[in-house]
Amino acid sequence: MAELAWWAFLFALITGVILSFNYRPWGDVFKSVSKLTGWLPYGAFFRRLHYLSGQAFLILTFAHTLEHFLRETYRHIKPQEWTKLVLLFFLSFPLVFTGFILKGDKGGIIAGRVMYNLAQEIPCLGSGLAALLLRPGEDFFLLPYLHHSVILPLVVIFLLGRHRKRLLPKGGLGWTLMAFLAFLATFYPLPPDVPPHVETTQIAGPWFFHGIQLLLRYGHPFWVGVLWPLVPIGLLAILSFIPSSLLKWAKWIVIITWLLHVTFLLIAWCLIPGFIK
Amino acid sequence: MKRTSIISLVVLLLIFIFLILRQEYHDISSPPSPDGCVVCHEPETELSPSHLLAVLGCSSCHLGNPFARAKDRAHMGIVKNPGDLHFSRLTCGRNGCHPDLPQRVEKSIMATNRGILKAMQTLWPHDTSESVHDVHELIEKPIGQSVALDHFRKMCGGCHLWRPRYPKLGEIGRRGGGCTDCHIQELSSHTQDLSKKRFRHPELTTRIPSENCLKCHNRSARIGLSYTGRFESEAYGTPYQKGGPGSRRLSGGRFYLELPSDVHHQKAGMDCIDCHTEKGVMGDGKIYTHQEEQVDITCITCHDPDLQNENPDRELARRLERLNRRQPSFSVLSYVISPNGSPLYHIRPGPGNKMKLYRKRDGKEIVFERLAQPEVHKAPYHKRLSCQACHSAWMPQCYGCHETLFKQASQRGWLTGKKWPGRWVEGRSYLRFRKPTLGVCPDGQIGPFAPGCQVFLETFDEKGDYQPDISLRSLVMASFDPHTTAKNSPDCIGCHLDSKVLGLGEGSLKVTGKGLNFKPVYLSSESGLGIEFPLDAFVSAKGSLLQKPSRPQGRPFNGEELKQITRVGLCIPCHDQYDDPIYSRYEQSLSRFLAGDAPCRKEVP
């Protein structure tokens, strides 16, 4: 699973580099993405492949973490190795989220604002952290671009430690994954980019954010937008530090929090359509 | 290598071959415009030299998704009319283009209609809980019970800049559209067939033709018509032509008569934009309630100019001059400045005591004289007279505005296009072109007044029963520049002893020792209108107010002023020159006259 996730990351990295030749995180970003997708030779294909390999990386990292969680690997390996795995899993979310912002469409802009505003809700650190994530105004996309294309990939490469002993991961199902993603990228239409000026009744964020998006309608942004998503990840990360006698309980708490997240996600999918009504 | 890897590689290879063969991905030559819209849409003409398609493309103005291949994606969020004020901040007003203009225009009188709304909400039956300040606020509000706002929505709301453009024929289809309302050269056909690749795009212009202004300014005060020498006449269609109604028709089937047009139109062929500045029309960013607060020119701006203004906006003047390629360029910047500081870059000092105007639309040079005859124009006893008071040749006057609301029927509103109960039927008593009535304008100057409006409102409920409690008489006289400027002005008697000009109405006026004796031509008491004074009477001979002024600060002449004006009128038959010595020491001369010492008194038996 880890090898497949490494493959997916590598595809995302390569396609991202290709796209970056024509992507500009300033000026009319929506137009830049529109041109990249609709006009440049193979632009649409590479954008789809980048999108799909990013999603595959997220899902495969999740599957890899779940696999080790179910095997209770955290009991046997060094705590820092387990923390690295959970951190890698955690970072796959902002990696995909910043990519969502960089689309430059209505959804991307709103996602960026949500990220900025949620960061500001954090007591004491809020405004400083928000300034590190995004800068409102003309440079709106610059920091998300920096995070998406430089900082987060470098951290992911570092965290992939065990699996990056070779330049390329082991073959195996990697080529199959690549063929599958390429096949999907050829025929799978990306969701439409909504021009930034369009008045919409509803905009949905990345799929994994829908549950939080639903809760944000009812709860305080800090509790439901910042703390609540961090709880299951945090609990997962500290598992290897918990005494063996309490591990059984801790494991069940982690499962319950994750199931709650999945439940909210499923409810949100029923309530929030993928795109504008 | 494992079998699965080999199969996967074969699949990958097939996909790449497919991609290479699939034309959609690579058969794209370099685009002829900055965006991909021209693949399907190719305008036959350019918009304007400063809005070249090759530079701006389509999406800079029309938004949408300029490089999407599928029609539904490409057209998502597309704006057919970029000038529409609902979008203009994103289109015309985007950064790097005209970022300050939409905000100014949104606050301008033509967009807010604040004056009309305020007057109607003050004078008509209205529930103050529904009050609004401007049109945009009214568009957002649900339909209520206010009769005033119902009338505005259904009868007046067709002329404002927030109104979207509708694909309708005639004048209605050309009105509205925000920036586009003024800044396009109208196409002869308003319906464009965009299913065809090649089509005619409307041209943008800053040399706005007067026809664009006349789309709206041909009703109410009718200044657009008057300026071009047209008077909307009664519906008889006279004078007949070939045994039938005349062929001189306006929009809505209205007839008109040809009268002398404004001298600026008649002699100089000037358009509206030759006088009215961009700030005066589009606003300066401040919210005004009345148009005279926003308009930033007066007659003396050009005819008695202050060329020594120390703070002219030279940069703006240069830019405006450069943008209008039909204007001659001068190395020395010397031009007229409006009282609010707008540079009238096309009006410059001429030889001697003359001035030069370069028409904005074609650059033609017009030479005109500065204010002459100081004994006339600077006479101290006429210092309160506005230029329009003497130089307006005629004024369209629409008497008796009969508005009837039938709640049994429905009518469509202009603002939303929706229909709801309540149908308005409008009529009038009569129309006249006559010399204006004079009175004291809100700014304290004496200027022309005309009915504006004399409302006779009758309301009938859902059962067809008359509702006296929401029916009313509201007779108002308004002051405005009729735009019928003539070089010559009436003689002295034409004002001092003319009952119509004095505000008494048409009739016979006698100045007696006991005061004014006036017999009106029109006897309202016998007309069934329910008023005791003539429709054209602003004030009684004793100086009592008969009709309300449209502004609290405006008024007709009071009793004392009427007395003074008519008293001078008795001297005028003999002393008809401005430089007559009796006028330089008028009070002294009058005392002598009353004491019987004046030479003329001795001669008169």
Image: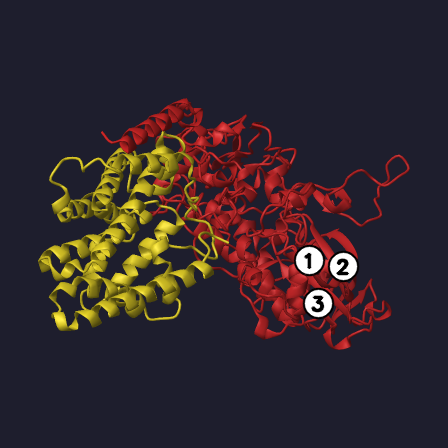
Chain colours: A yellow, B red
> Disc 1 is attached to a residue of which chain?
B
A168 or B268, nearer to the observer: A168
- Location of the C terminus of chain B (image quadrant): bottom right
C-alpha separation, residue under disc 2 versus residue under disc 1: 9 Å
Report the disc number at residue A272: none
User: Residue B233, position in %: x, y?
Assistant: 77, 48
Lateral position of residue A218 relative to residue B599, left or right: left
Q: Quadrant of residue B13?
A: top left
Tags 3 and 1 touching, CB below 8 Å: no
Looking at the image, residue A34 lies above or below residue B23:
below
Lateral position of residue A188 relative to residue B520, left or right: left
* Circle 1: residue type: Met
C-alpha separation, residue under disc 3 versus residue under disc 1: 19 Å
User: Residue B509, position in %: x, y?
Assistant: 77, 64
C-alpha separation, residue under disc 3 versus residue under disc 2: 16 Å
Residue A41 in sight: no
Report the disc number at residue B155: 1
Q: State the residue at coordinates (11%, 59%).
A: A76
User: Residue B576, position in %: x, y?
Assistant: 66, 52
Which residue was labeled with disc 2? Answer: B426
B107 or A125, nearer to the observer: A125
Tags 2 and 1 touching, CB below 8 Å: yes
| Label 1 secondary element | helix
